[in-house]
Image: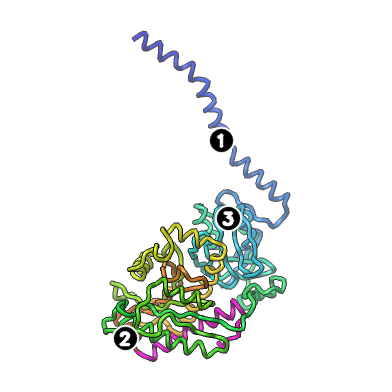
Amino acid sequence: MDAEGFREGAVIPRLFPRLLVVFLLLVQIPNLPAQGKAAGRNSGVAQGEGRSRAEGERLHFSSAVVVGGARFLPLAEGIAALGGRVAQEPLSGRIVVTLAADRLALAPESRYLVRLTDGSVAQMRAAPFYEGGRLLVPEGFFTRIVARRLGLSIEVEVAEVATAKAGDLPSPAASSGGMEMAPSLPSPSAMTIVLDAGHGGEDSGAVGRNGLLEKDLVLTLVLKLKTELEREAGIEVVLTRKDDTFLPLPARTKIANRSGGSLFLSIHANASVNRKVSGFETYILATRTSDRESRRLAEQENAGTSLEEIGYATLSDLERILADLSQEERSIASTLLAEEIQKAASMLLPARGGRRLSGIRQAPFYVLVGARMPAALIEVGYLSHPEEARRLATPAYQERIVRAIARGVRRYLARRYRFPTTP
């Protein structure tokens, strides 16, 4: 007992200096954030009025503009406060935000932005616009999208708030020093559009309750779409298949690349175990899927083809390719293409009878992987939905689908290339 007691007593003098150091550190640590905040305030004043400051999870903005009840904030101001940077690319006109390990690309008048590291797409609740030479973005860009990327809960404080009507706002060209932000690529004299009718031959694709086969429906649509698009002077359409023949997925994009296509559209019809699901959807390539339904669809469309067959060992290899600079530009253009097609579909194919227009979604569709051009995959509707399958079988509704896709393509060409097209 005495020996045990002696050894325990001897430990206390040896531990005391260490405990004292820990105690002093604990006393000092709570003061450190306050000192950091004070330093931040002083440095912010020294750098001038109107600059935002990030204080932990809180962003301070010098001003904001409210349009239609939504608050818009200066992009460069908030990104600078978070330690990032904003740059405009002279050729494409897109805005690239670099923040930590992330790079996000967006364009004025488009609600969609692309994460350049993996090609995934996020949607803002409203499109950015220029006002007084500043690019303003919806508040949710910071509180929702950026916060998620950084793993933060961001709060916003604004010194001054102005209210404006959408019609009073200047155009992007007028408010950015007279430079047109988009489109900015030179207008070509001719465009080659590659249309891919999904499935074919022994691969019938989805089958409707009315007996309508996906392979037959999409071939009919593609042939009609070719005629519609070639009404425009300077547009040539190349088809991956012209009849009921089977074509492997890699062969489809090889045809597109050999033809020197300006864009690639793969046309499909969807199906689901849930017969209530319906709607027109536009997909772009990404290694990550938008949701479980997109993952199911990609697996269904990719069935029978391995990553090795299209030149990749794993999805990580594909992700590295998507991060390539040349692929970044195609990702932005593909998003713009999908946005215009979906916008036209929402106008010409109005929701009715429980239909659901799902907008732009993303998934690793193998048929899009090899395309060296902007590309999108369109699901024109659900053959598993009885009413939608009935409509899809009618020539009148097929014509409406063709007009919607054609209008979206024309709008894309006009925005990106200033290509002269009819509305």
Label 2 belongs to which residue? 390
Classify residue 415 as left or right of residue 389.
right
The amino acid on which the numbered mark 3 sits, given as a three-letter code, is: Leu
Q: Between residues 91 and 373, which one lies in front from this camera angle?
A: 373
Q: Residues within 10 Å of mark 1 (few under 14, many from 20)?
A: few
Mark 1 vs mark 2, CA separation in Å: 69 Å
N-terminal label among 1 and 3: 1
Identity, as a three-letter code, of the amino acid under mark 2: Arg
Helix, strand or loop status at disc 1: loop
Quadrant (top left/top right/bottom left/bottom right) for the N terminus: top left
Residue 65 in the image: x percent, y percent?
Answer: 62, 67
Q: Is residue 62 magenta?
A: no
Q: Hey, what amino acid is under mark 1?
A: Ile
Q: x and y percent of residue 171 in the render? A: 65, 76
Q: Quadrant of residue 248?
A: bottom left
Tell me the element at label 2.
Answer: helix
* CA–CA distance in space, label 1 to label 3: 28 Å
Image disc number at residue 29: 1
| Depicted 190 relative to depicted 97: above or below | below
Who is closer to the viewer here, 279 or 224? 224
Residues 19 and 316: in front is: 316
Name the foreground residue: 42 vs 423. Answer: 423
- For marks 1 and 2, the one nearer the N-term is 1
Task: Locate the C terminus and report the quarter of the image it occupies.
Answer: bottom right
Task: Give the left or right position of residue 210, taking residue 185 as reference.
Answer: left
Q: Where residue 138 sits in the image (x, y, percent)? A: 56, 66
Magenta-span inclusion, residue 400: yes
The answer to whether residue 248 is seen in the rendering is yes
- Badge 3 element: strand
Instruction: Look at mark 3 in the image and give the residue it sits on.
Output: 99
Q: Work out whether mark 3 precedes mark 2 in sequence or the reverse, and give the earlier one.
A: 3
User: From which residue to which does the magenta span run?
Assistant: 394-423
